[in-house]
Image (tube, rainbow, N blue to C red):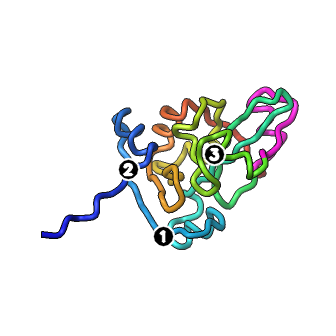
Amino acid sequence: MAKEKKEVKTNVMRILEKEKIPYEHQSYECDDFIDGIHTADMLGLPHEKVYKTLVTQGTSKNYFVFVIPIAEELDMKKAAKSVGEKSVSMIPVKDITAVTGYIRGGCTAIGMKKQYITRIDSSAESLDKIYVSGGKRGSQILLSPQDLKRVARAEFGDVIVR
């Protein structure tokens, strides 16, 4: 009898299960990561429910994580103010893995190498569920923004260009 292909759990899934946080996992083929909009379109997901994770560095040299809707842009002034910095800037793509433990296209606020100050855009507060990366390319997790806030030790904040 043929064995069923077992779903490979990501670190994110293990963390969510350990914390008893309900989630749904969606996997897809992903050779080359383009962007979150491409991923959402490929999976037929509404753009306003899919969030991307951005990593910045402040003038203090500390790192900060922002989770925002895929079609939106991080407002650098609002972002800096929300974390008590004079300014923040995006980290270079080549540094993502070293800073977070994740690769571009698989970066998520759950289970990074270190605990960084994290802000989820306030637009997520009114939604019952959002999609975030599952910790690797080809993996999306659906969970409540409140659960994401708890497991990522984040706060909500107005951090996008409006």
Counting other residues with Cα less than 10 Å from the Cα at mark 1, is it few (<14), some (14-19), or many (20 or more)? few
Instruction: Please say if the residues under marks 2 and 1 sit with CB atoms less than 8 Å apart.
Output: no
What range is drawn magenta here?
74-91
Residue type, numbered disc 1: Glu
Residue 1 on the magenta span: no
Of badges 3 and 2, the one in the foreground is 2
Residue at 49% over, 51% down: 134
Query: Mark number for residue 29?
Result: 1
User: What residue is disc 2 on?
Assistant: 9
Q: Which residue is mark 3?
A: 67
Give the mark, 2 or 1, whose residue is nearer the N terminus: 2
As displayed, is residue 7 above or below residue 158? below
Inter-mark Cα distance, 3 to 2: 22 Å
SS at circle 1:
loop
The quadrant of the rendering that contains the N terminus is bottom left
* 61 vs 129, nearest the viewer: 61
Type of amino acid under label 2: Lys
| Mark-to-mark CA distance, 2 and 1 | 16 Å
Q: Is residue 9 above or below residue 48?
A: above
Q: CA distance from mark 1 to mark 3?
A: 23 Å
